[in-house]
Image: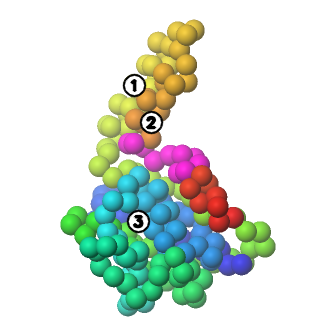
Amino acid sequence: MKTYFIKIALRGISPMIWRRFWIPGNTSLADFHHIIQIAYGWDGDNLHRFHIYGKDYGISYVGGIGFSDDARKVYIRDFEFDVNDKFIYEYNFFKHWFVDIRIENIKDVTTLKPAYCTKGNGMLGASKYDEMKATLNLLEAVVKAKKTTTVGDIRPFVDALNEVRFNRHHVNNFLQRELKSQY
C-alpha cells in the first residue's frame, strides 16, 4: 500500500506553523480532517473543506454546505497524487484558516500502520514567551513537589505546556487513540 509523506502548514502565519505526517493511502478525507484537527489542537466545531484538483470535499452537516461525495468514502489513494502535488484544507469559514498541504514523498509499504506525525513546529496563537513561561511553571511545580504530590497534581502544568508548544508525542498518542479502530 502507498504511504504519503505530507507536510501541512498554516497559510499566512509567521513564524510558520507546520506538521509532517505519513498517511496511509487508505485514509479517508474524513479521517484526514480529524488528523488535521488533532495536529493543530482544534475542536472540530467549525465547517471545513478540502479543495483538491478543482473540487471541494468535506463532511456535510445540517445547516452547512453540502458535498457531492461522502468524505468517509473518499480516500487519499483515490487521487493518485504525485510527489509535490498540493491541495488546500480550509477550516472555520469565518476566520478562513487555510492549510496548505503538499505531498513530499510516496512509498510502498508492506505493513499497514496508522497516520503518524514525524515533525512539527509552532502552535496557533502561542509565542516563544508563552512556551517559556509554561515550561518554567512546570519546572517550578516539579521542584516544589512534595512526597505527597501525584502525577495528577502536575498534569495541569503539562497540559498548559502542550497548549503552547507543539508536542509530537502528544499528537501521536491522540492519533493512535482516536484512529485505532481502522488499523
Look at the picture and state if 105 lies above or below 56. Answer: above
In this view, the residue farthest toward the front is 62
The answer to whether residue 49 is visible is yes
**Which quarter shows the C terminus?**
bottom right
Q: Relative to 141, say whether 37 is above or below.
A: below
- Residue 64 located left or right of residue 111: left
Q: Is residue 89 above or below residue 166?
A: below
**Would you identify the image quadrant in which residue 133 lies?**
top left
Q: CA distance from mark 2 to mark 1?
A: 11 Å
Q: Report crowding for label 1: few under 14, some 14 to 19, many 20 or more residues within 10 A (C-alpha).
A: some
Label 2, residues with CA under 10 Å away: few <14, some 14-19, many ≥20: some
* Above or below for 80 versus 50: below
The residue positioned 60% from the left and 64% from the top of the image is 115
Could one spot residue 168 in this view of the protein?
A: no
Q: 84 or 33, which is in the foreground?
A: 33
Figure quadrant of the N terminus: bottom right
Q: Residue at x 38, y 60 (%)?
A: 44
156 or 81, nearer to the observer = 156
Q: Which mark is residue 9?
A: 3
Q: Which residues are magenta?
A: 163-174
Q: Residue placed at 61% from the left, 54% from the top? A: 176
Task: Inspect the image, locate mark 3, and give the three-letter code of the amino acid beneath it.
Answer: Ala
Residue to which mark 2 is pinned: 159
Q: Secondary structure at mark 1?
A: helix
Q: Amino acid at mark 2?
A: Asp
Residue indicated by mark 1: 137
Please tell me whether mark 2 or mark 1 is closer to you in this view.
2
